[in-house]
C-alpha cells in the first residue's frame, strides 16, 4: 500500500520552483574526482553575479526608498528563515562595527529566534503568525523597512512578515530566487534573483544563498553610503572597538587628509576617536566642538559639513 504524502500541495509547489529543480546531468557527481567537483561548483558560482546584475535597477530603487526612510529615523529589518534568516542576521550584525549604526537601527529576525542561528527550529519557517509577533515586538512605524528574504519566495515566515509590515505602513522589500514569487508580489519592491537549479538538489544555501548575500551587501552598504556613513569609499563612521580598528581609523584619516601621523593622533584625541570628526578638523581647520556641530547640522554627511565650513 502506497502512503499518501502528508503535504501534497507543498510537494507540487516545490517541484515547480527553479531552485528545487533536479539536474540529471549531475546525478553521478558523487563519482567524480574532488577536483572535478570543485571545478563544477566554481563554474556554478560564476553565474550568480550575472543573475544579480539583471536586478540592479530594482535593487537601486529599493535602496533609495530605504535611505529616505532611514534618514528620518527609520530602521532596516530583515526577516527570513533558515539560511535566508541567518544571512539577514549576519548583515545586520555587521552594520554597527562597519558604519557605527545605532543599536536596533538594523535588525535581523530569524524564524525561531536566536537559537535558529545554529540549530533547526522545527516549524518556525511555516508560521506567518510568528513573523507578525516578531515584528509587533519592534513596534513598526511608516519610516521602517522590512525585507523578507526567501530563496523559494514562498516561505510563510518571510511572506507573513512582508504582508504584516505593509499593512502597518512600513516599506517592504521581497528578495527571492524564483520568478513569480508570492514574496515579491507581497512587497512594494520585489527583487527576484533567479540563480537556477542548485548543484545539490534544493540546497539553496549554495547559489541562492550567495545571491542573497550579494543583494543584502548592496542594500545595507549602498543605503549607508546614501546616509553619509562613508566619505568616498572610506569607512569614516567605523567604530574603533579594538586595536585593529583603531589602526584602521588612523589609516582612514591619513587617506582622507594626507596629514602626518602626529597631526592625526592629535585630531583623533581632540574628537574622542571619531574618525569623521577628526577628518573635518584637519581638512577644515576647525576644532573638535565645531566639527561636531557642523556634522550635526549636515545630518552626518562629511562632504556637506566640509562645504559648510568653507562657506
Image (cartoon, rainbow, N blue to C red):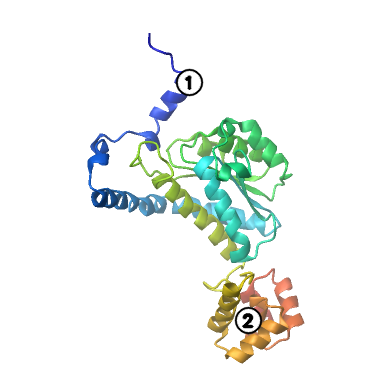
Q: Is residue 49 left or right of residue 232?
A: left
Residue 291 screen position, x and y as percent:
71, 80
On the image, the x and y values in percent for residue 236 come to 60, 73
Q: Is residue 74 left or right of residue 125?
A: right
Image location (x, y in percent) of residue 115: 61, 42
Q: Is residue 218 above or below residue 158?
A: below
Secondary structure at badge 1 equals loop
Residue 310 showing in the rendered view: no
- Answer with the quarter of the image where residue 305 lies: bottom right
Residue 123 seen in render:
yes
Which residue, given by chain and number where applicable, does mark 2 sit on?
Answer: 279
Q: Is residue 78 left or right of residue 60?
A: right
Per the rendering, the mark at residue 7 is: 1
Q: Give the secondary structure at mark 2.
A: helix
Which residue appears at 74% of the width and 44% of the height? 139
Residue at 75% over, 76% down = 293
Residue shown at the point (67%, 70%) measured from the top left: 300
Q: Nearer the viewer, mark 1 or mark 2?
A: 1
Picture quadrant of residue 109? top right
- The crowd level at tag 2 (other Cα within 10 Å; few <14, some 14-19, many 20+) is many
Residue 136, compared with residue 243, is above or below; it is above
**In the rendered image, which quarter is residue 97 located in?**
bottom right
Q: Are marks 1 and 2 in contact (CB under 8 Å)?
A: no
C-alpha span from label 1 to label 2: 60 Å
Picture layout, residue 253 above or below residue 191? below
Amino acid at each position: 500500500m502506497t502512503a499518501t504524502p502528508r503535504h501534497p500541495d507543498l510537494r507540487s509547489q516545490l517541484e515547480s520552483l527553479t531552485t528545487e529543480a533536479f539536474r540529471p546531468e549531475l546525478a553521478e557527481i558523487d563519482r567524480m574526482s574532488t577536483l572535478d567537483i570543485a571545478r563544477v561548483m566554481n563554474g556554478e558560482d560564476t553565474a550568480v553575479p550575472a543573475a544579480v546584475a539583471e536586478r540592479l535597477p530594482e535593487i537601486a530603487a529599493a535602496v533609495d526608498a530605504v535611505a529616505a526612510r532611514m534618514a528620518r529615523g527609520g530602521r532596516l529589518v530583515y526577516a527570513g528563515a533558515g539560511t535566508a534568516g541567518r544571512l539577514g542576521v549576519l548583515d545586520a550584525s555587521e552594520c554597527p562595527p562597519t558604519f557605527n549604526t545605532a543599536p536596533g537601527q538594523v535588525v535581523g529576525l530569524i524564524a525561531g529566534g536566536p537559537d535558529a542561528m545554529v540549530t533547526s527550529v522545527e516549524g518556525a519557517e511555516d508560521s506567518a503568525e510568528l513573523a507578525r509577533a516578531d515584528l509587533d515586538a519592534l513596534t513598526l512605524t511608516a519610516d521602517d523597512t522590512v525585507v523578507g528574504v526567501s530563496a523559494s519566495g514562498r516561505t510563510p515566515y518571510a511572506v507573513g512578515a512582508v504582508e504584516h509590515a505593509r499593512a502597518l505602513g512600513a516599506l517592504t522589500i521581497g528578495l527571492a530566487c524564483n520568478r513569480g514569487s508570492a514574496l515579491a508580489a507581497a512587497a512594494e519592491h520585489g527583487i527576484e534573483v533567479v540563480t537556477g537549479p542548485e548543484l545539490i538538489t534544493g540546497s539553496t544555501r549554495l547559489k541562492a544563498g550567495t545571491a542573497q548575500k550579494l543583494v543584502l551587501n548592496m542594500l545595507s552598504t549602498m543605503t549607508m553610503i546614501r546616509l553619509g556613513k562613508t566619505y568616498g569609499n572610506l569607512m569614516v563612521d567605523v567604530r574603533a572597538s579594538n586595536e585593529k580598528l583603531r589602526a584602521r581609523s588612523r589609516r582612514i584619516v591619513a587617506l582622507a587628509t594626507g596629514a602626518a601621523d602626529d597631526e592625526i593622533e592629535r585630531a583623533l584625541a581632540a574628537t574622542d576617536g571619531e574618525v569623521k570628526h577628526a577628518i573635518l578638523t584637519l581638512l577644515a581647520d576647525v576644532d573638535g566642538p565645531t566639527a561636531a556641530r557642523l556634522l550635526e547640522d549636515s545630518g552626518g554627511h562629511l562632504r556637506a559639513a566640509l562645504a559648510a565650513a568653507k562657506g
